Image: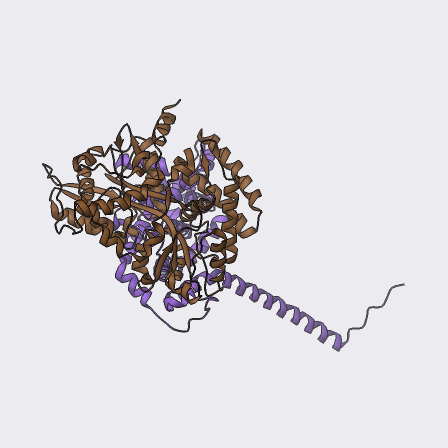
Chain colours: A purple, B brown
């Protein structure tokens, strides 16, 4: 005997709608709480840097620490520009990063295109081998690279240093671009070849315009890596006039007397160029990384 | 026996006569006053003029990054430049925490970059063993110096000294006399127990801390550098000819004492630079630290400087680590003779006195004389005067060649004691095992 369905009343519908609305609101609140939590964790060190640099030095030694500055003192920035060649460091880092980015993007394009569009023996093994180079930590290979650079007279040179930085990012750049190039239908490239285009023309006129976000993504990765790189820069560059910012900042740290607020002020300034670079390139980066990640 | 082993044993054999180190310093003052006179020469002694084109020497050191010391060295180099035209000195190097690593990378890549290399007590041995250092005996002989501190014995091979100390530092107990007075402490500690008691009485967290010593793994160099001294109250050694000794009773006692101080008196989590600020701000009462630190404090904490004092180490042996920092000449460089000229300039008595006083150092490397007046103007010096110095090779054995690696293992385990309350015996037993494995890998 079949059971008759329960009658749907207006009050029941209203209650169900309210429950759904409540559940939706709860999910949304939970979502925003999670976002706030992640933002808090991410931004708290930056907030702390800012607070430490703009409050009086004596306040930095108080416990419990002041989360909100009660007085503003910008002397850390004044002292920074008076005592340290921060402009020179930032300029050197910018030059270095742009050079490494350019080298990396150019070589990654050629490498990725070779892996993606050309058929040759050992192609797969070579691609894996490229990735394996990423598994070697810098500290492990610093000595041989240092020796090679000394023998070649490439030390104390920003172009020389940019080669190492580019070399370190190149494998990941090749893989990002290879995955992007793989998403372009072969028929498009074949059609161009049928029309008489050579491989370079196909690359520059067909493939690259369609994968611009990938190029930008590789550029951003290379720029960020080079901007932050320390070990090679510190080992290869001793000339004060050539020091990039990562090394310059470290030189402010001494055993007994590191001016924390000045160091953090330098850190803030150090962070600005990459942030601007990223904001400008952001939409390409996301498109590039996601497009490269999905095939088919 | 391998070549390495032969060299190592040759280098280590002539041990420092511990009683001599500071006695040399005090004798220097007395003898100097009698022979040379207390008045400082107004003019600098010029080096012998070299023939030919101008030579630029690179002097690699971390001194350029140290307040007070950097100014002293730049002043000396200015004087050297003013005294002659043939040789110019160019600054090179890196901050202390990166300096040794950089030199080791250079060494492993085939040789040193700089003509003059500043060294630490352990780095100088590495370079000596690697055959990178020129003999400086001719510098000493030409200046007629016969009273070079015995601290140089361990870098003297076949009668040839291979580095000349430009900074001798020795650990002592510095304290803020104002805080002691405010707390009503009139009797200074004379035993380890009293030291603990007084330090705890001076602690009122979070505003005031009775004691500070480096204790963060993020600062491995200074953590290990200072931790080694904590074995001195118990006459401990970290390693000897039998191998690592970190599970021995004196070292267990040392780590336990460090833990007691950490728990009850340290500003936990303060790094060196923060602690320096806290010290300057009157928040830290004492530090077990090298005499050279006072030079930094004079610059970074001028208000505190008049209140800095030291007291006699509160353990019977008065044993304390003295570290010489020899300037060395790259034997494989292109400018060995010119580099020696600079060293000779530095070691000329009037120049050496100028360097020592400008650095606010207190232990001359040879009988330089003329320092009575200077010493009498240093009220914080008293606690350093009766110290019985010992050297890093004395407490590290053959591991002195791998001091950093050794220290990294020790501080990792000590950190577990400090922050995870791991029993000292258990942590140091593990450290002992790891160090024995390290010794095995290094062939020690």
Question: Left of B179 or right of it: where is B337?
Answer: left
Q: Residue at x 54, y 48 (%)?
A: B417
Q: Nearer the viewer, residue A193 or A24?
A: A24
In the rendered image, the residue lying farthest to the bottom is A11
Q: How many marks?
A: 0
Residue B429 falls left or right of residue A274: right
Give the image location of residue A259, x and y in percent. Answer: 35, 59
Q: Nearer the viewer, residue B158 or A6?
A: B158
Residue that appears at 49% across and 46% down: B254
Where, quadrant-wise, is the N terminus of chain A in this rendering?
Answer: bottom right
| Quarter of the image where one finds residue B184 | bottom left
- In the rendered view, tell whether residue B259 sits above or below residue A20: above
Residue A166 visible somewhere in the drawing? yes
Q: Nearer the viewer, residue B12 or B202?
A: B202
Give residue B277's position: percent from left, percent from top.
38, 61
| Residue B1 higher or lower than B279, as above or below | above
Residue A30, by quadrant, is bottom right
Residue B143 as seen in the image, left or right of residue A239: left
Residue A249 seen from this side: no
Q: Residue furthest right?
A: A1
Instruction: Using the rendered view, name the quadrant where residue B35 is placed.
Output: top left
Task: From this view, report whether residue A62 is shown above or below residue B29.
Answer: below
Residue B28 on image: x %, y %: 24, 44
Residue A192 at x, y percent in the picture: 39, 43
């Amino acid at each position: 005997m079949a059971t008759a369905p329960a009658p749907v009343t207006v009050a029941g519908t209203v209650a169900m709608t309210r429950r759904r609305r409540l559940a939706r609101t709860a999910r949304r609140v939970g979502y925003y709480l999670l976002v706030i939590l992640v933002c808090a964790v991410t931004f708290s060190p930056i907030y702390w840097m800012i607070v430490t640099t703009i409050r009086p030095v004596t306040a930095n030694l108080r416990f419990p620490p002041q989360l909100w500055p009660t007085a503003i003192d910008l002397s850390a920035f004044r002292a920074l520009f008076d005592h340290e060649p921060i402009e020179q460091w930032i300029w050197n880092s910018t030059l270095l990063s742009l050079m490494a980015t350019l080298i990396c993007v150019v070589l990654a394009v050629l490498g990725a295109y070779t892996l993606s569009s050309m058929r040759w023996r050992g192609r797969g093994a070579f691609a894996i081998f490229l990735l394996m180079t990423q598994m070697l930590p810098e500290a492990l290979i610093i000595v041989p690279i240092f020796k090679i650079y000394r023998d070649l007279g490439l030390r104390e040179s920003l172009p020389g240093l940019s080669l190492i930085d580019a070399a370190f990012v190149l494998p990941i750049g090749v893989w990002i671009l290879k995955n992007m190039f793989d998403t372009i239908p072969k028929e498009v490239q074949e059609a161009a070849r049928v029309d008489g285009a050579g491989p370079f023309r196909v690359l520059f006129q067909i493939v690259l315009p369609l994968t611009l976000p990938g190029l930008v993504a590789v550029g951003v990765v290379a720029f960020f890596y080079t901007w932050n790189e320390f070990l090679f820069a510190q080992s290869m560059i001793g000339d004060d006039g050539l020091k990039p910012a990562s090394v310059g900042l470290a030189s402010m740290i001494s055993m007994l007397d590191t001016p924390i607020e000045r160091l953090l002020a330098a850190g803030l300034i150090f962070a600005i160029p990459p942030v601007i670079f990223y904001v400008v390139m952001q939409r390409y980066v996301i498109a590039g990384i996601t497009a490269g990640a999905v095939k088919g | 026996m391998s070549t390495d082993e032969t060299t190592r044993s040759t280098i280590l054999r002539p041990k420092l006569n511990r009683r001599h180190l500071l006695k040399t310093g005090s004798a220097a003052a007395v003898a100097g006053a009698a022979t040379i006179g207390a008045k400082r020469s107004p003019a600098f002694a010029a080096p012998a003029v070299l023939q030919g084109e101008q030579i630029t020497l690179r002097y690699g050191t971390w001194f350029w990054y140290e307040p007070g010391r950097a100014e002293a060295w730049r002043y000396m180099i200015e004087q050297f430049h003013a005294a002659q035209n043939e040789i110019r000195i160019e600054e090179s190097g890196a901050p202390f925490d990166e300096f040794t690593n950089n030199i080791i990378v250079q060494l492993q890549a085939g040789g040193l970059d700089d003509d003059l290399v500043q060294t630490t007590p352990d780095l100088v041995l590495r370079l000596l063993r690697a055959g990178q250092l020129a003999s400086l005996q001719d510098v000493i002989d030409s200046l007629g110096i016969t009273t070079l501190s015995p601290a140089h014995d361990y870098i003297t091979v076949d009668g040839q000294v291979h580095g000349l100390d430009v900074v001798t530092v020795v650990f002592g107990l510095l304290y803020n006399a104002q805080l002691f007075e405010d707390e009503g402490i009139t009797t200074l500690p004379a035993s380890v127990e009293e030291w603990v008691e007084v330090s705890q009485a001076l602690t009122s967290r979070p505003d005031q801390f009775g004691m500070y010593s480096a204790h963060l793994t993020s600062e491995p160099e200074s953590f290990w550098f200072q931790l080694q001294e904590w074995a001195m109250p118990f006459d401990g050694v970290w390693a000897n000819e039998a191998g690592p000794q970190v599970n021995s009773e004196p070292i267990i006692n040392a780590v336990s004492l460090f833990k007691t101080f950490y728990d009850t008196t340290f500003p936990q989590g303060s790094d060196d630079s923060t602690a320096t600020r806290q010290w300057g701000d009157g928040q830290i009462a004492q530090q077990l630290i090298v005499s050279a630190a006072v030079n930094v404090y004079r610059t970074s904490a001028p208000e505190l400087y008049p209140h800095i004092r030291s007291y006699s180490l509160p353990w019977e042996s008065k044993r304390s680590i003295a570290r010489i920092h020899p300037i060395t000449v790259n034997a494989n460089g292109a400018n060995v003779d010119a580099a020696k000229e600079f060293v000779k300039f530095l070691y000329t008595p009037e120049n050496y006195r100028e360097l020592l006083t400008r650095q606010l150092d207190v232990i001359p490397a040879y009988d330089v004389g003329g320092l009575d007046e200077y010493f009498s103007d240093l009220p914080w010096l008293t606690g350093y005067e009766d110290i019985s110095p010992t050297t890093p090779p004395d407490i590290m054995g053959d591991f002195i060649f791998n001091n950093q690696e050794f220290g990294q293992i020790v501080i990792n385990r000590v950190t577990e004691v400090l922050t995870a309350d791991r029993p000292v015996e258990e942590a140091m037993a593990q450290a002992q095992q790891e160090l024995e494995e390290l010794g095995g890998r290094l062939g020690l």
